[in-house]
Every structure is written in structure tokens, then in C-alpha cells.
Image: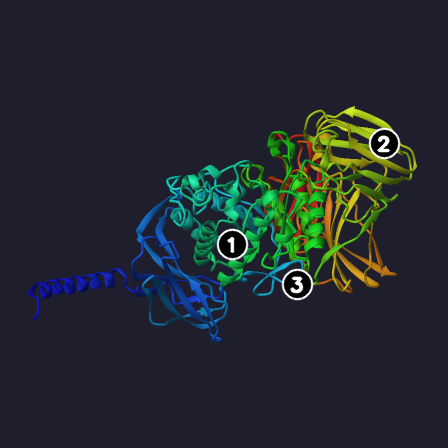
Amino acid sequence: MRCPYFCSMFKIYISALASFLVLSQISAQIPIVTAAVPTATTVEMWGKFEVKLTIAANFSNPYNYDEIRTAATITAPDGKTRQVEGFFIQDYSLNTQTGTLAAVGTGSFKIRFSPDQIGVWKYKISCTNAAGTGDFPEQTFTATLPNSLKNKGFVRGDQTNYLHFDDGEQYIPVGENIGWQNGNAYLDFKKWVTKLADNGGNFFRMWHCSWGLGLEWKNGSDGYAGLRKYKQTNAFYQDWLFDFCAERGVNVMLCLHHHGQVSSQVNPNWSESPYNLANGGTCQNTWDFFTNSEAKNHVKNRLRYVVARWGYSRAIAFWELFNEVDWTDQFAQKKGDVSNWHGEMAAFLKNNDPYQHLVTTSYAQDFYDPQAWNHPDIDFTQTHYYVNTPNMERVLVAGVQNYLDDFGKPTMNGEFGLTTTGGNLSTADPTGIHFHNALWASLFGGGAGAGASWWWDNYIEPQNLYPNFAPVAAVAQAVPFKNANLAPAPATVSGAPGDLQLTPTVSGWGGLADTVFNIAAGGAVTPSGAALGSFLYGSQWNTQFRRPPIFKVNFLQNGQFRVKTASETGQAPKIAIWLDGAKVLEQAAAVNQTYSINVPAGQHTIKVDNTGTDWILISGYVFTNLGSAVDAYVLKSSDKKHLAGWVLNNRYNHDYLKNTGLPPAASGAVLTVPDVENGAFSFRFYSCLTGALISTEAATAVGGSLVLDLPDLLWDAAFVAEKGSVGTTEIAQNLPIKIYPNPATSAPLHVSFDLEKPENVSFTLFDMAGRELGNLFSEKLLGGPQAIETQLPSGLPTGVYWLKVAAGSQVGAAVLEFGF
């Protein structure tokens, strides 16, 4: 017999269960992609293909890939498939007058992709959450040939020291740091990138930081919303920026973390970090960032978003995992954890980036971490140098060559700058001479590109140093860096005697320098690559770092040895100098001073030490009447048939010009390059002020050694050489010009030259560092001999200037003295 009560309760239970199942199906609904609308169905190869999605799905955080994931399976014309992830975006309209943004709509998911083949591509969209996966019917788009000469594809590496684009053309980075905006992101970046590109620049380095265009920071801080919630205004500015850079042919190193985010000591931002446990994060200590599994998963989520949103962009050349990671707390003790983190994140990028962008990182100090640099997923190395020295270029080149020797990967200088009292570069070097010299030396010293100055907003911009990029970029086009597989080669210069200055290159605290340096009568230093320390440590504190240098030197005539201190010191240092075992000088040391001893002709041993309490910085060691007035930086091909180089009158530096004036021209210099193939070589010399070809020379290698008389050098020159006839790659021809009177006065200036045919002619005045001061003349002239009268600007200070004359494909420059 059935129980009426039981039957009634059973019906209620079944009804409730049915309701629960219905509600469960609703809350756990498999995502439905209701629309996938492409911005366009035809896109150029290596361009941006974009699809906007309409999705019905349950999620609370659209940026959390563990919660919801959109993706596309894309099939190339050759049948190969690849996977790309989507991302959530809040769209905006951009006011190009004010740079402000206005939100459009409530946000949506998008897919972006860059095709690398022409033809018809197929793609199928999917969306996945905890309930399952829904997809959308397959669609197609067509990729065409690039429609812009600026579109060369993505930046790649190979077995040489240099980089190249997908189309095979070499990529030689020439540019600067542009870390963040000062005001409005659109207005600032458009101004700076435009000036960079207009002057031949093709590279800059940018940070993801909370005061710049970062994505993730403390909830409630300046529009940020915490972990896995990405600031959409900053992301939208980057959408514009990377597309703008692609149009202008400018590539970006995107730095994804900076040291302050994980530091409580150096530029500390840890108190505001969303990873900090005090702010709702998962890390009790700063160093937990590198080991805590939840923290690493948060980082990987952000990397997925970055790759999904901007991986398509050919303008992004490199992912940089960290800026100067050795400034993070307890780095020396936790270095193994930091290296492991780099290996894990680099591998994650390689596994999730369909475009395989190159990956790097950076350290501030010279005690770089071989474990990280040797990781196979770190594609190239990077140096940062800040020292106060007249010849900054020597420091950069030493770093480049050490890294090439140690790691066998392309390397470049990611930051450099003078360290000056008060940090005022506009006072220390207002015309940017160290900047000019550093660009040329770092490139011809073996770097994958020219070094990148840090001071974009308070030095390069206000001092208008952008024109320095143009000749470097122009000459780089004429040098077969990649195709000839060029690499640093030994070379000597004789015939132009000068003082030998050794510049410290181990700039970091605690870096262990070499101690014994052998210097031949001609100034050659052995062992090759030996490095001096910039810190001269005292006898009482930090004694574990003491490495007093010893110089074994041969003076052919009587001279002096000088120790030059830099702008910083510890407590109570003393400079002591020994000559052949006898102490001949011991004085309390001060900053920016020179301490000298006389040295008779002959072979001697000189030792320098700090017998005081604490350290002092050294800017250089000088040996008078020893060495050459010309420094040479030479590259040689693996087949020994190609050479390229840069030669510098080493007294043409910011310190000499500021304190002494214009140096004398270096005359009679002879360049010797050993270990080349015997036979005739053709040399092309280029002006480093204009980028124009200034002369062609011939030299013959005999006995495996090539000897060449160098032109007189007031400043510098670059050259390219190859065995056989002169190549056809020319960027501009030299235009010989004459100036009268010279020295000039306020009276009219007469400029004479010859034109082969009618040309548009312009005269431009530059200061000693090549910084443009104004246009003096612009007119179309008939062919034949020319004698043009022009007027110098009123109020022009007494000094030495350069006058540049441009006439069609010809460019000439001459030194102009005024007011003497």
C-alpha cells in the first residue's frame, strides 16, 4: 500500500530537482559565438587582420584566461595551422587634437592575426569556459603582398651577430629609449616617434610601468584595477602606437617589468604592487615574485594578453622580460630563482607566441648572470652603462665585445648615459658629442645596432639631438653587417701620436676587474679585452672587492701617468701611485681631480691603489706620449674579404671641447688590420656628420695584413671596404665646398662649389656636435660653378661650426670658425 505523504514529498523533490537542473544548465551554458565580423577580408602580408566577436557566455573577469578563452585556429594557404588567442578590449575614440579618449560601447572580444603568406587563409573561432567550448563556422580572408616599403615583416635572428626582417633585409636598430610619456601618451609619443623616424631612427625601448603605459597595478591607483584586470586606456594607446610605428618603420623593445616593481630599495614601487600581499596579492616578500606559483600564473596570464593583443604587430621587435632585474631585493642571494624565472617566462613566451618575437632581458651591473643569458630562449644579450668619462664609446664597445665573446649571441646596448653631478647632461655635454660618438662606436664595435641613450625627454628632445641618428642610419644601409657576417677584429693605428687613456669598463658595484695590464710602446693593451674597474676600493671598507690595477708599460720617451677621478666618492679615499715598486705619490683624493707622476723613458711597472678608508670612482688612467690620437673600431667578415669601421680623433670628446676647445686634427694616421685575404681592397669613406660618401681609396693586403693611410680627422669618419672593385651601394656623393672668409665674421659668407646639373640647394648650420642650428639658404640653382653669398645668424656665439650643403644626391660639409 502506497503512502500518500511519501508520494507527495517525492513529487516536490522531483520538481525541485528539475528546477535545479534547468538553473544549472543556464549557469553552466556552453559558450555561443553568435558573430565573428572581420574589420576587412583582405589584409597585406605581415599586416593586421582583426575579427570582432559577439559571444554569449558566463564569466566574471574577461581578462582571466582560466575563466574564459577565445581563440582561432587559422589555416595558411600551404595548409599549415596555427593557434592564436583572443583578448577582451574596451574600444575608444581618440581625439587627435587633445589626445584624449572617449569610451565606445561596453567592450568585446577580438582576435588579431598577422599572415606571413599571400593567398586565402581559413579561420575558425572558438570560445571556452568551464562549461565547454563553442565555435563559429569557418571563414576566410585573403593576404596580399605588402603595400608599403616599410613593411618588411618581423625581426628575426640567425647565426650571425645581426638581425634581419622576414623579407631577408638586415635590421640595424638605430634609436633611443622612450620609456614613457610625460603628459598625454598620444601627443608625446607621436611627437617623439615622428622626430625619431624623420631622422632615420628605427628603434625605441618602452617600459610597461604604472606611470607609463603599464597594464596591471594596484587596485584604485590611477585607473588600475589589480591583478588580471588590465587598464584599457593604456592598452588602447598602445594599439595606436604600435600601428603608428609599423607605418613609420620603427620597431619597439617592449619591456614587460622594471626593477622598481619588485624592489623596496632601488626606485621602490613594491608598496604599491598588486603582487604584494598587503595589497591583496600573493607575495609576502619581494623575492617571492620569482618563486610563488600564483604570482607566476598571474604574470603568465598577462603575457597571454600581451601576445594576444599585440603579438600581431611587426613593430614589436623584442619582448624584454625585465629592466635591470639585479636591482630587485636580495638579487645576489636569489639570483638562481631569478634565472629560473627568466627561463620559465621566456619558454612560456616561445610556446605561446605564434610570431616568435625575440626575447631578452637586462641587468644594471657588470656581474651579469650567465645562467639567464645562456638560456636557449633568451635570443640576444643587452648591456646598460652609466659612467662619467670623456670617451663613453670605449665603455660601450668593451661591453659589446665581452658579451659577444662570452655568450655568442647578438648583443646591443639598451641604455647608456653620462653620470654627472646633478645629472644635468645639458650642462655637461649640451651638444651631445658623447651621444654622437656612442652611436657610431657601439655599432662598429660589434653591436647588433647603435646604442640607445636613456635621456629622451630631458636631453635628446630639448637639445634637438635627433639629427645624430640620420647619418648613422644612412651609412648602416651601405654596410653588409649581416650578409658578410661581420665581427669585431683587431686593428692598430700608428703615425698620429697621442696620449693613451684607459677607460674603466667594469662599472658596477662589486664587479671584479682585471688587475694586470701590459701596454706596448704603441699603446696596444694585452690581454685583449682586459677590463678596468671604475670603483677603486679603499683599504678598510669593502676590501673583498679590492683589485688595484698594475700597468706594465714601455715609454719610448719621457711622459706622465695620470689618475683621473670621477664625480662620486665614499669616505676619506687616498690615491697612491707606485713606480717600479717605490711609492711616489699618496694624497687625499677628491672627485673630478687628476693625480700625476712623471715617468722616464723605458720599461716600467706602475701600481695604483686607494690607501684610504672607502671607495672613489675613477674616470680614466692616462699615459702621455704613448698611443695614438685616433681610435679605430673595425669589423671583419668571416671570409676576410670585407671590412667596415669607424675611426675617431679621440680628443674630439665633450670633456676636451668644453675645457680646451677644438682639438687639432689627427693627421698622418695609418690603419693596420691583420689577418685579411691578400689582394687589392677598395675603401669608401663616409662623413659621420652627413652620411655622404666623401672619398674612395685603394689599399693592398700583403702577407695577410692590410695597411691604409687614413684621411685627416678633425672628428671622425666611417668606412666600408671589400676585396675587388668598389660596390654599387651608395647613399650620397660628397660635394666639395669652400668657405670664405674662414674664420668668418658678421659680414656675408661666401660658399663656392660645382653642380653637375640644376639642383635644389640648401645650406644648414650645425654646432660642433652636429646639432642643427638653422637653414641659411634654400634655392634651385643651375648647373656649373656656384658662388653663393649668405649671412650667418645674428648673435651667433664665437665658436666652431659645421656648414652642410645639400644638392640633390650630393652632400658636403666644411668646418667654419666664427668670431676668432
Q: Is residue 490 left or right of 423 when viewed as pictured? A: right
State the image quarter where residue 89 is shown. Answer: bottom left
Quickly name the residue at label 3. 159
> Which quadrant does the N terminus fall into?
bottom left
Quickly name the residue at label 2. 578
Can residue 681 be seen in this snapshot? yes
Of the pair 754 and 53, the residue shown nearer to us: 53
> Which quadrant does the C terminus fall into?
top right
Which label's residue is closer to the chain start, 3 or 1?
3
Residue under the point 70% across and 53% down: 406
State the image quarter where residue 637 is shown. Answer: bottom right
Residue 567 point in image, percent of width and height: 68, 30
Q: Check disc 1 and report its element: helix, strand or loop.
A: helix
Q: Check disc 2 and report its element: helix, strand or loop.
A: strand
Quickly name the residue at label 1. 248
Which mark lies nearer to you, 2 or 3? 2
Of the pair 144 and 286, the residue shown nearer to us: 286
Can residue 741 be seen in this snapshot? no
Q: CA distance from mark 2 to mark 3?
A: 47 Å
Q: Amino acid at mark 1?
A: Arg
Q: Which mark is residue 435?
A: none
Residue 447 point in image, percent of width and height: 67, 52
Give the crowd class for mark 2: few <14, some 14-19, many >=20 residues within 10 Å: some
State the image quarter where residue 683 is shown. Answer: bottom right
Q: CA distance from mark 3 to mark 1?
A: 28 Å
Q: Amino acid at mark 2?
A: Trp
Q: CA distance from mark 2 to mark 1?
A: 57 Å
Q: Amino acid at mark 3?
A: Gln
Of the pair 121 and 383, the residue shown nearer to us: 383
Residue under the point 19% across and 63% down: 17
